[in-house]
Image: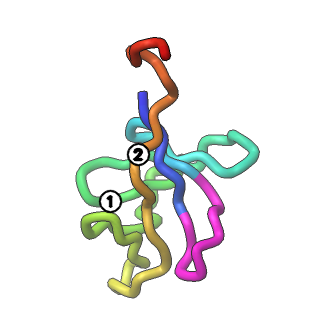
Amino acid sequence: MSTRGISNRDGEVFGYLEGNRIYDLQGQQTGVVQGQVVYDLDGGRQWLLDGDALLDLKGNVVGYIGAPVSDGEGEAPL
């Protein structure tokens, strides 16, 4: 499964996306992606997704989701 870093507009990584789950840097799940919406663990809308852009609920860009980074499973050995 691939992982994608989540950064703020300044490029500082503050979390990551693995599958459809959002985690903070300590590895605690903080949300889940359903369609183009990120929900917190209580089911409230937290962010919106527009491609790789992370938007607040008013449509302002607050960050970005990085390119996928493979965990190495299924890759051929060197």
Residue visible at 45% across and 51% down in the picture: 43
Of residues 78 and 71, the one nearer the viewer is 78
Q: Give the spatial CA distance, label 2 vs label 1.
A: 19 Å
The magenta-colored residue range is 7-15
Give percent across and percent down for residue 10. 59, 81
- Above or below: residue 51 compared with residue 22: below
Asked if the magenta segment contains residue 13, the reply would be: yes
Of marks 2 and 1, the one in the foreground = 2
Left or right placement of residue 15 versus residue 65 in this view? right
Asked if the magenta segment contains residue 2, the reply would be: no
Residue visible at 40% across and 36% down in the picture: 19
Give percent across and percent down for residue 37. 32, 59
The amino acid pointed to by label 1 is: Val
Give percent across and percent down for residue 38. 40, 57
Residue 57: quadrant of the picture: bottom left
Q: Are marks 2 and 1 in contact (CB under 8 Å)?
A: no
Residue 7: quadrant of the picture: bottom right
Of residues 24 and 40, the one nearer the viewer is 24
- Which mark identifies residue 68? 2
Give percent across and percent down for residue 77. 47, 12
User: Could you tell me which secondary element the residue under label 2 belongs to?
Assistant: loop
Q: Residues within 10 Å of mark 2 (few under 14, many from 20)?
A: few
Of residues 47 and 69, the one nearer the viewer is 69
Left or right placement of residue 37 versus residue 61 in this view? left
Left or right placement of residue 1 versus residue 34 in this view? right
Could you tell which of marks 2 and 1 lies nearer the N-terminus?
1
Q: How is the image coloured?
A: rainbow
Residue visible at 46% across and 41% down in the picture: 69
Residue visible at 44% across and 58% down in the picture: 66
Q: Which residue is mark 1?
A: 37
The amino acid pointed to by label 2 is: Pro
Quadrant, the N terminus = top left
